[in-house]
Image: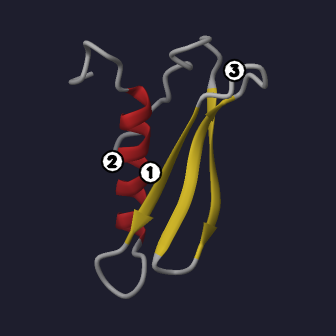
Amino acid sequence: MSEIKLKPCPFCGTLPYTSVNGSNGKKIKGYIQCNNPHCGALMEFEIKTESGFLRINEVIDGFNKAEEAWNRRAGNETD
């Protein structure tokens, strides 16, 4: 597993952060947000399990997919 680095905000260039809102054992809700209080760019994500409870590999895969989605830019969908 390789670490994914978040790209700066596509609107203002400030570095973002990842946060988790909550978990109930079957899903995790969170977001990636720009750290600039005047920007407000936010991308919510949800990690759901296929089984009855979340497994660590599902959590890691979910965070990786959320980070890849944040890093995707128009015209560079494969980056």
- Residue under circle 1? 63
Proximity of marks 3 and 2: CB atoms separated by less than 8 Å:
no
State the SS at label 2.
loop
Rounded to the nearest angstrom, the CA distance separating label 2 from label 1 is 12 Å
Secondary element type, mark 3:
loop
The one of 44 and 54 positioned closer to us in this rendering: 44
Give the residue pinned by disc 2: 1
What is the quadrant of the C terminus in the image?
Answer: top left
Circle 2/circle 1 CB separation < 8 Å: no
Residue 5, x across and y down, in percent: 47, 30
Q: Residue 19 location in percent, x, y?
A: 64, 49
Above or below for 65 versus 52: above
Q: Left or right? Give the position of 34 relative to 36.
A: left
As shown in the figure, which amino acid type bears the numbered disc 2?
Met
Between disc 2 and disc 1, whose residue precedes?
A: 2
x, y (%) of residue 78?
A: 21, 24
CB atoms at circles 3 and 1 under 8 Å apart? no
Q: CA distance from mark 3 to mark 1?
A: 23 Å
Task: Answer with mark 3 or mark 1, whichever residue precedes in sequence.
Answer: 3
- Disc 3 designates what residue? 39
Q: Vertically, is 78 above or below 28?
A: above
